[in-house]
């Protein structure tokens, strides 16, 4: 990859790659069916056999440090100046749809499907129908992965669905194993920082992390 083409003219970091689970959620990698399929694939292999080999895995190019005209923003150098989204309407649609599928009464099944298809319609080419006729909770989880990739939601999503530590859902290198493996459930919680424990004797370390 040419760092300057992505708005980092004097540097770049060779680490931003997706495991095979993310690209496999898209119908194709060209973006024809789903414009959110944003991966750099030339010279890359889908599988990450060596974490230290940058050509292993598909880098996500969802975020680029350029303007809407493809130009470098003012002051661009080694570090990115791209704003990071915190709240998006798309996430609110997915939250409402999931709440209904989990038994919430603030909306309807029909509205949940409509919310889901709003995102699918926006993501697809206008000549290709990408709408679903029915959805379940697994569809919402997958749609969140497509819509919210690289926006720091995946960990909490998988915890909410009971898939972060269990062996019911694996990804490459989960648990430090190339094919993926389940891990102990205490990893659903982070450990409390030692600095916090040292200054506040009322705190107790989360289970599984020692005293």
Image (spheres, rainbow, N blue to C red):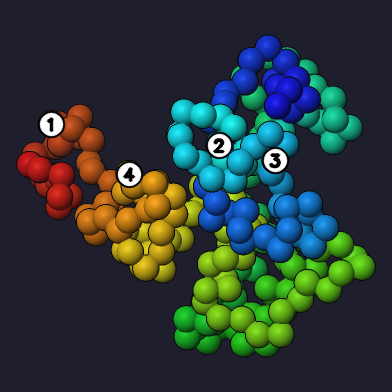
* Mark found first going from the N terminus, 1 or 3: 3
> Separation of disc 4 and disc 1 at Cα?
30 Å
The answer to whether residue 153 is left or right of residue 199 is: right
Asked whether 161 or 55 is in front, the reply is 55
Residue 58 can be seen in this image: yes
> Separation of disc 2 and disc 3 at Cα?
10 Å
Vertical position of residue 107 compared to residue 79: above or below = below
- The mark lying in front, picked from 2 and 1, is 2
Instruction: Locate the N terminus by quadrant.
Output: top right
* Mark found first going from the N terminus, 2 or 1: 2
Q: Position of residue 55 (x, y in %)?
A: 59, 32
Q: Which residue is mark 3?
A: 41
* Mark found first going from the N terminus, 4 or 1: 4
Q: Position of residue 9 (x, y in %)?
A: 72, 15
Q: Which residue is mark 4?
A: 176
Quarter of the figure with residue 18: top right
Q: Which residue is mark 1?
A: 198
Secondary-structure class at tag 4: helix
> Separation of disc 4 and disc 2 at Cα?
16 Å
Instruction: Locate the C terminus by quadrant.
Output: top left
Q: Residues within 10 Å of mark 2 (few under 14, many from 20)?
A: many
User: What residue lies at 57% left-to-right and 71% top-to-bottom?
Assistant: 140
Vertical position of residue 151 compared to residue 135: above or below = above
- The mark lying in front, picked from 4 and 2, is 2
Q: Which residue is mark 2?
A: 56
Asked whether 13 or 94 is in front, the reply is 13
């Amino acid at each position: 990859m040419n760092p300057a083409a992505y708005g980092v003219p004097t540097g770049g970091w060779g680490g931003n790659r997706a495991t095979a689970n993310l690209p496999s959620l898209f119908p194709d990698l060209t973006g024809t069916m789903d414009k959110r399929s944003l991966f750099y694939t030339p010279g890359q292999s889908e599988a990450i056999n060596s974490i230290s080999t940058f050509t292993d895995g598909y880098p996500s190019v969802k975020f680029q440090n350029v303007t809407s005209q493809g130009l470098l923003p003012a002051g661009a150098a080694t570090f990115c100046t791209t704003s990071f989204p915190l709240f998006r309407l798309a996430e609110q649609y997915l939250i409402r749809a999931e709440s209904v599928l989990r038994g919430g009464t603030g909306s309807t099944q029909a509205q949940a499907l409509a919310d889901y298809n709003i995102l699918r319609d926006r993501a697809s080419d206008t000549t290709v129908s990408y709408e679903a006729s029915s959805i379940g909770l697994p569809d919402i989880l997958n749609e969140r992965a497509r819509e919210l990739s690289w926006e720091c939601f995946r960990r909490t999503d998988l915890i909410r669905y009971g898939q972060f530590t269990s062996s019911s859902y694996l990804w490459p290198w989960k648990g430090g194993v190339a094919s993926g493996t389940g891990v102990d459930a205490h990893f659903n919680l982070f450990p409390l920082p030692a600095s916090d424990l040292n200054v506040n004797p009322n705190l107790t370390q989360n289970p599984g992390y020692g005293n």
